């Protein structure tokens, strides 16, 4: 199963950056490019629990070829987490629920070497975000 072009571009850029500091800056830049959520989207229902920082993921559902397609928007109050949200949105948003449910972002992040430099708390938060997205997709798939 192919990953979306936006995510492929991010993954390719990350492979060119050997130095963790450069990767860190790039991830923060990705987060800065996200559009902020509306205040109305920052609800308890959209809040991701299990993250040390504040993280909200809002989703909308459309249908394509009879299958639910999920679109995500997200925001965090921590710069590096906001960047991780941007990467997850590039990977998951706009895809059919069955593809989202079948895509393990943690495995992909590990292959890219993205989790090894995160604190345990940040890594747990990442897992919480992925579980939230995939759980929603599995419920619809």
Image: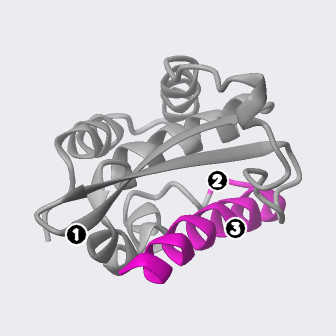
The part of the image, by quadrant, that contains residue 9 is top left
Q: Residue at x 78, y 36 (%)?
A: 42
Residue for badge 1: 67
Q: Over which residues does the magenta segment extend?
A: 117-141
* Distance between mark 2 and mark 1 Cα atoms: 37 Å
Residue 97, given in percent of the width and then of the height, sits at 34, 70
Q: Is residue 37 magenta?
A: no
Q: Residue at x 48, y 45 (%)?
A: 72
Residue 119 lies in quadrant: bottom right
Residue 128 bears which disc, if any?
A: 3
Q: Sequence order check: which comes first, mark 3 or mark 1?
A: 1
Check whether the beta carbons of the residues at disc 2 and disc 1 lie within 8 A of each other.
no
Is residue 127 found inside the magenta-colored segment of the image? yes
Please state if 65 lies on the left or on the right of 129 as rendered. Answer: left
The quadrant in which the C terminus is found is bottom left
Q: Check residue 137 in the rendering and tell me which mark sits there, or answer none.
A: none
Q: SS of the residue at dot 2?
A: loop
Percent coordinates x, y for residue 57 in the rendering: 63, 47
Which residue is more in the foreground, 51 or 136? 136
Report the Cα–Cα distance between label 2 and label 3: 17 Å
The percent coordinates of residue 25 (x first, y second) are 56, 24
Q: Is residue 113 left or right of residue 6?
A: right
> What residue did someone put label 2 on?
117
């Amino acid at each position: 199963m192919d990953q979306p072009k936006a995510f492929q571009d991010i993954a390719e850029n990350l492979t060119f950056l050997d130095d963790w500091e450069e990767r860190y800056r790039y991830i923060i830049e990705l987060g800065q490019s996200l559009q902020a959520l509306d205040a109305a989207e920052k609800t308890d229902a959209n809040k991701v629990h299990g993250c040390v920082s504040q993280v909200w993921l809002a989703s909308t559902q459309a249908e394509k070829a009879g299958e639910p397609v999920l679109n995500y928007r997200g925001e965090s109050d921590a710069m590096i987490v906001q960047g991780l949200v941007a990467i997850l949105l590039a990977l998951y948003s706009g895809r059919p629920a069955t593809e989202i449910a079948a895509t393990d972002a943690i495995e992909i992040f590990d292959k890219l070497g993205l989790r090894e430099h995160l604190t345990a708390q940040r890594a747990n938060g990442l897992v919480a975000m992925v579980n939230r997205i995939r759980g929603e997709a599995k419920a619809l798939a």
